[in-house]
Image: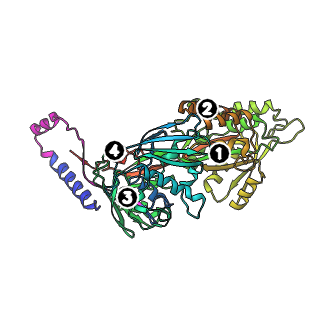
Amino acid sequence: MKRKLWHSLVLFILVIMLMTGCNIGNDTTQDQKEETPKLMTPEEGGEIFLPVIQFTTLNPIVNENQSVYFLNQLIFEGLLALDNSQKAQPSLATGWNVSYDGNEILFDLRDDVTWHDGKPFTAEDVEFTIETLRSNSETNNKSIYSYFLQSVKEVEVINNSQISIRFDSPLQNQLEVFTFPIIAKHQFENIENAYQALNIIPVGTGPFEVESVDRHNEIRLVKNNDYWGTKPYLHRVTAKIVPDQGAVLTSVFSDKIDVAQARDYDWKKFAGDRTIKKIEYVTQEYEFLGFNFNNNLLSDNNIRKAIALGMDRHKITEEVYLGHATVTDVPVHPNSFLFSQEAQTLGYDPVKAKEYLANSNWINRNNDEWLENEIGDRLTINLLVNNNNLQRVKTADLMAQQLKNIGIEVFIENVNWEEYESRLYNNNFDVILGGWKLSLIPDLRTILHSSFINSSNFINYSNPVMDQLLDEAALAKDQDIRVEKYHKIQQEFVRDLPYFSLFYRNSSLIVKNHIKGSISPNYYNIYHGLAGWYVNEK
């Protein structure tokens, strides 16, 4: 949309108003003061422009392009959807029942949904989608969603509005699994077509349907007037195709698109720009320190606690990430319904840190900068970091400075990624500075359970109390019990400190000011709530 002319016209009108303001009489001024402000309400219509980076396919089953993934959430829907607390809510399914043993779930489906081509949505579409994704494990077909359905044993259509799904093992109450997009059986006809159809015009059930696709220029979506849920205010959403993320930001500056993601290193570019608003949100990118439990020094909880209390994480986020990070004590997303605020007990406390060190007999015995044990050995640790991540390298430098203040000598080992990964899985480190992109479906067993030692539990952490809590949380058939167990897991995590949580990285959505409504992006759907966005008012 070309808005430069419009901006110039508005500016011209404002200048004229200022120039003539001196000649306005008192009576007119009085009338203006007494005029009652008008309430503005959203009005249907209008168009917004989003970016899509050059893509291979719009087929949601095989797509791996993140910008297409976000766009597809306007077109497709899952059985369930996540709210802003990451809790599963009804979508194409109106309700569900989990069997007593947790091995079966029965979904009740909406009976008022049609596909964008007018054909009715039924349980057969759900069955086809699940069987398509399950086929991933048996063929060369590939989908980002297949991993979550590995434990599905059988799918049975009860009737058009009811479907049963059985599992090899208990469901573990992870309803978040069922947010994958449901595809139309009649569009693909068979499983192989679902994987091979790259040039399709997507047919979904969502609030917007595809009007046209020009693979070199734009994808045009229009409002789905037959949508079963809350209908959008916007009449059209046009996705402009750009070559890369740099072009996305350039397109914002040139008024070619209205909305874009911006990372911490991009935000300075928009400083002082009053034509936009920046809505910050917490990503799933979690940064941490991992302690090697095969190291006698670091198997001492007093040492781990001292390291944690000796670090000012807020200072690190300000200096390295420009403040665009959210400090946390646990590897559970701060917006998750599973997050425990009561477990947030760690803070910067160098005095307390020195007390923990003294409790393990590390004190300053020769009046230098460092602490020593009873035989005179200096308190020294090696910190492993991958040198291709400059922000981690800067973080490691700040950590070394901060730990020096409590008497710990830190040697930073900056290594390339290949050596970093090799030393990680060969247990050749003292402390490692690392990060995970945590799954949308929480399961901390992979990083904390003793059964994962020598694989994803690379720190060799073993704690029977933690193992039991993790197993109980995984097998919980009731959501409230799951929350209770996760709160206890987080309390045990902070008490035993197998990892020292640093922060989650933040991102933001850059939005032009003429777009209004409840704009609430999150890491799994940056266009969350777009049905409530609008550009027209009355």
| First reached walking from the N terminus: tag 3 or tag 1 | 3
Q: Residues within 10 Å of mark 3 (few under 14, many from 20)?
A: many
Looking at the rendering, which quadrant does residue 399 occupy? top right
Q: Nearer the viewer, mark 4 or mark 1?
A: 4
Q: Residues within 10 Å of mark 4 (few under 14, many from 20)?
A: few
Which amino acid is tagged 3?
Val
Q: Residue at x 83, y 42 (%)?
A: 378
Q: Amino acid at mark 1?
A: Phe
Disc 1 is placed on an element classified as strand
The kind of residue on which mark 2 rests is: Lys
**Residue at the disc numbered 1:** 288
- Residue 344 shows in the view: no
**Image-based side of 233 in relation to 359, left or right:** left
Query: x%, y% of residue 267?
Result: 47, 53
User: Do the numbered discs 2 and 4 sit on residues whose CB atoms are within 8 Å?
Assistant: no
- Range shown magenta: 22-51
Q: Residues under labels 4 and 1: Cα distance?
A: 41 Å
Comparing labels 2 and 4, the label whose residue is closer to the camera: 4
Amino acid residing under circle 4: Gly
Q: Residue 485 shows which numbered tag?
A: 2
Spatial separation of the CA atoms under disc 1 and disc 2? 22 Å
Disc with the residue nearer the chain's start (3 vs 2): 3
Q: Nearer the viewer, residue 207 or 124?
A: 124
Q: Quadrant of the C terminus?
A: top left
- Mark 1 vs mark 2, foreground winner is 2
